[in-house]
Structure formats: structure tokens, C-alpha cells
Amino acid sequence: MLNKIYDWVDERLDITPIWRDIADHEVPEHVNPAHHFSAFVYCFGGLTFFVTVIQILSGMFLTMYYVPDVENAWKSVYYLQNEVAFGEIVRGMHHWGASLVIVMMFLHTLRVFFTGSYKKPRELNWIVGVLIFCVMLGLGFTGYLLPWDMKALFATKVGIEIAASVPFIGELIKILLAGDATIIGAQTLTRFFAIHVFFLPAALFALLAAHFIMIRRQGISGPL
Amino acid sequence: MSNNRVSRRQFLNYTLTGVGGFMAAGMLLPMVRFAIDPVLQTKAEGDFVQTSQKVADLTEEPVRVDFSYEQVDAWYKSEVTDTAWVYKQGDQVIALSPVCKHLGCTVNWAGDSAHPDQFFCACHGGRYEKTGKNIPGTPPTGPLDEYEVAEQDGLVMLGKKIANTLV
């Protein structure tokens, strides 16, 4: 049945080459854990992506209940966690996944560093990777404020003070982030929400695409 | 045993698809259940709300009774006001919902001067008899809903909306 549907579509659109391009690629022996168990270190990039997919999905579902407003943000988080079925699980996935992304990404960076995979001709992919790292940290920082509890508020106060310590333009960055010169409140929350769910994910998708196209183009780096 | 040989490639394909599907389901199930929760939540309503309308003051002529109650909308609690058209039929107190069964506008008793003994909806000219029965040839497809009615301390108490029992 599925085969017939596939053949029907394939006959008209010739989709086989498209998914072959995506799915068929060389996995050299030195990166295959089935050959050398220590090659599991090559899994961290894929694991980072896997956790990122979970973050995107759970985040999408969380916005069904969350409101980025000082009056209701905390209440809506409390409601979705305690009153909605599986709310604890879905919020838990997003909460723990956020930390896991950073951990996996860090391990991936270490692997790339110690195998020397960043060297010519892969310097550009290293740079894109560092940009992804920055975007991920930005997502972590902006997401931390959204539950609008005391921990979130004071973490953001500290974070914004750190940003304000930048020479010359620190004050500008602070106002730009907080949306107000003195208050961390309504405008900070809506800004962080917008940055967290629209601006940074958009940047992340573009960078991930570049990251993956480059690795496909250049192949996995050789053995040590 | 059948004669269909399962190749190594096929076996691995089935295994990977199975394990992958299981993992994907484990990931998506909580999220989907989370999303469809409003459909599955059970409502424990049915409390009667006291109005300021005295039962003794009611006549056979429907009067507009406004009443308010606390509504819990997820994390948002608010005082909402609702309306009923209340009249007496013999000893029985009747309370009809003012929500038009055509597209949800609000009907008024004697809202149309040409039909002083009918409910009238100004949006599309829907009309109902005093019992709430919709008049054929006007847009509504069913009779007005009814409120459950009770009496306490001589005042009208309204319960939840039910399908019209008079027609």
C-alpha cells in the first residue's frame, strides 16, 4: 500500500533522487561506532540536532498555553504545568532539553576541536558552528525569563547588568534588551518572548541549514 | 514458516523503522495529549446562580433578567454577566436563553414592533414564539435554549443551559 503510494508519487515527481541526496551519504569506518566503539564521539552533533528538534516541538506546544504578559505569564505557566494533561512532561522536556542542548553542543565542539576537524577546508563550518553556539546561548538566556518567577527575574537582571558592562555601548544594549532604561518588566518580557520564539529560531534555522549543507558538501573529516 | 525470505536489509529496515517509530511516538504522545486537553477536560458545572428577580414579581410577560457569576477561564478569573428572558407559565417559571439559534446574536422580546408577542433577533430577522419555538420561514433552525430554574428565598435561581423542553 505505502509502496504503491510512493511509486505513484515517484512516477510523477521523480522524488527518489531528492531523498537519496539527503539520506545516502558515506559513513566512513572511523566514525561508525559499530566498527570502533570510541567513534560514539561523532554522535554528539546529531544528538544536538535531535534535542533541538525536541526543543522546537515542545516549544511550539507550550505557546498554546503561555502568554507573554506580566500579569498572566506566571499564572499561565502554573496552569499549563499543573492543570493540563502532560503539562509537566511537555514543560519538563523543554526545561531539561534546554540544558541538554548546551551540554551536547559543548561535547560536539570538543570533538571537532580534538579531531582537528575545524582545519582547512572546514574553517567556515567552524565559524557557523560558533554562531550557532551564540544563538543557542541567546535562546537559553531569553527563555529563562519567560516563566516570570523570581529566579527568572533576577537572572535576567544580572544578565542585563552584564550586558550593560560593555564599554561605551553597554547602556544602549541594556535599554535595547530591557525595553526600558530602568524597569525590567512588561516590555522586557514581550521582547524576550519575541526574540525567543521568532528572531533567534529564524537565525538558528538559517545557520543549521548552512552547517548541514557544508558538512554534506565537504564530507566528514578524515581519521586522526 | 513462509517461503518469503526476509533479507538482512529488510530486517534492519523494519527494526529501525519500528524503534524509530516507537521513539517518535514516545516524544509526540505527551505533546499531542497536552494540545488536545481542552477537548477532554470534564466540566463540573451545574451550580445555580442567584438572580435579583423576585418570583412573585413575574408575570406571563417575559422580562429581561441580568445575572452575573464568576467564570474561571484557565488562569483567568472574571465576573461575567449573562441574560435570560424569564416569565411564568401557570405556576412554572420559564427562563429562556437570549442566544439566537441562527448565528448566536441576542434576541429581544417584542424587539420587532410588528410582532409584539415574539422574540426577535435584529441580526437577520429571526423570530421565536414565547415558548422559544422558532418560526418557520425565519433563519433559526431550532428553538431557543432553556435555563434550569430553581427558587430560593423568593428569588429566581438559574442553572445550566439545556435544550428547550417546551417545544
Image: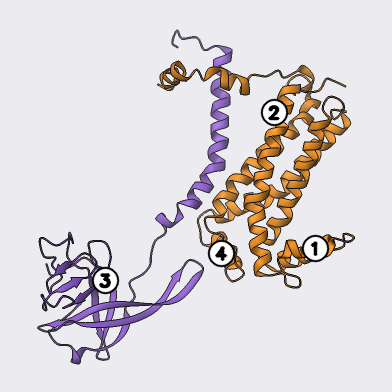
Callout 2: 10 Å neighbours few (<14), some, many (20+)?
Answer: some
- Quadrant of the snapshot with the N terminus of chain B: top left
Tell me whether the residue at label 3 lies in contact with that at label 2, contact meaning CB atoms closer than 8 angstroms.
no
Which chain is assigned orange?
A: A
**Tag 1: amino acid:** Leu
Q: CA distance from mark 1 to mark 4?
A: 32 Å
Which residue is disc 3 drawn over? B106
State the mark number for residue A213: 2
Can you tell which mark lies on residue A62? Answer: none
**Which quadrant holds the C terminus of chain B?**
bottom left
| A174 horizontally vs A71: left or right | right
Question: Which badge, 1 or 2, is on the more N-terminal residue?
Answer: 1
**Picture quarter containing residue B2?**
top left
Q: Say if A55 sits above or below A174 in the image.
A: above
Quadrant of res B132: bottom left
Amino acid under disc 4 = Ser
Residue A83, percent across and down? Answer: 51, 62
Q: What residue is shown with label 4?
A: A76
- Label 2 element class: helix
- Looking at numbered disc 2 in the image, what kind of residue is underneath it? Ile
**Callout 1–callout 4 Cβ contact below 8 Å:** no
Circle 1 residue = A172
Instruction: Confirm or deny contact between disc 1 and disc 3 (CB under 8 A).
Output: no
* Relative image position of residue B46 (x, y in whole percent): 33, 72
> CA separation, marks 4 and 2?
39 Å
- Tell me which chain appears purple: B
